Amino acid sequence: MAAVRRRRPAHRPGPRAAVTAGAAALLAATSVWTSGSASGAGAATTLTVAKDGSGQYTTVQAAVDAIPAGNTARVVVSIAPGTYRGLVKIPAGKQNVTLQGSGAGRSDTVLVYDNASGTRKPDGSGTYGTSGSATVAAEADGFQARNLTISNDFDEAAHQDMSALQAVALRTAADKVFLDSVIVTGDQDTLLLDTASKAALGRVYMKNSSVVGNVDFIFGRATAVIDTSVITLKKRWDGSSAGYVTAPSTAAGRKGFLITGSTVTGDVSASSFHLGRPWHAGGDATLDPMATFRNSTLGAAVKSAPWTDMSGFSWKDDRFAEYKNTGPGSGAASSDRPQLTDAQAADQETADWLAGWTPSAS
């Protein structure tokens, strides 16, 4: 639901001597970066990106490519305002990378591309697949994104001849991921919160952010908290209102998605969206998808029976629940709307999901 096209580094224009000196300084910093702990302790190294050449690099990927393989110390990629069209991949060997917009607001710096699952690769080796369609792919532990927008602007209406229209904006497949004051926007499969493998732990904490989409647009097997954020429901390519907010594929024995203190809203028809459905990726019956919406405001678009089945798997066999939600889309406990008891809710707090990790800005 796989490969990302690599871009040639685009360094700041200037004399060759200046580029060589910059590369030498970067290599000299390697020993400092690799001496940091996996938690990113110590002063962060900052690399600057600006489209106009006023930074060290003109593309985000060029800055990421400059980080030494095996890095563990915090590196902040500071990105000047502007729209950066291109793919960005942070490989597993480059831990503790922060992508940070330097503008006044998160809409000032935009990372965008338009691959879809069914988009053919330029080398003729097939299509990207859902996970490979991501505009930004973060595979390294300790990844952070702050004060920017990550978008997939694939045009579904223009590609109705394509069978696979899933188009990911951000894919995380790592542990200790912190998404702080970001906008992640797309249509189908906008935000893929995944893990490096089925057995791996992948904790994600998203705060003060916005996620926009329409079909399964928050999905994956990560243990993820979305806190004090806005989830915006979007109409389909043909103007219709119908969709699903979450599609967790949680491994048995792990925690899935916790949406807390947030708002579900959007300019769509009333009673047209489900809160979620169970994604048993690859038909894996051993998975135990989990999603909890608690202490959140649910708009009128949320169906009175907010959960539904998927690909032959019943949501009632998995873990879906609410707790003390408000708003026109909320409802009382019933067989269609499981509600946590107070005792159950006490074990479904943010700290339970993060399991000893305290996200902090760097």
Image (cartoon, grey):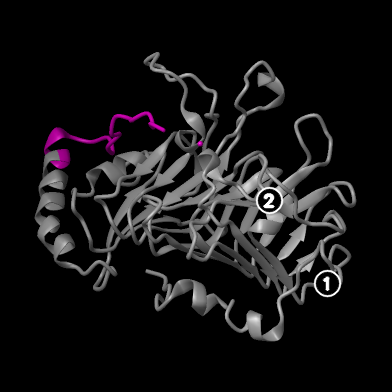
Name the one closer to the observer, 198 or 7.
Answer: 198
- Gap in Å between the C-alphas at discs 2 and 1? 18 Å
Q: Earlier in the sequence, mark 2 or mark 1?
A: 2
Q: Give residue 75's position: percent from left, percent from top.
A: 29, 59
Q: Where 184 sits versus 330, above or below? A: above
Residue at x 30% of width, y 34% of height:
10
Residue at x 83% of width, y 41% of height:
241
Name the one closer to the observer, 199 or 238.
Answer: 199
Label 2 crowd bin: few (<14), some (14–19), many (20+), radius 10 Å: many
Kindly state the secondary structure of the residue where label 1 is placed. Answer: loop
The image quadrant where one finds the C terminus is bottom left
Magenta region includes residue 9: yes
The residue where tag 1 is placed is 333
Magenta region includes residue 180: no
Name the one closer to the observer, 236 or 114.
Answer: 236
Q: Which residues are magenta?
A: 1-19
Q: Give residue 143's position: percent from left, percent from top.
A: 38, 58
The residue where tag 2 is placed is 277
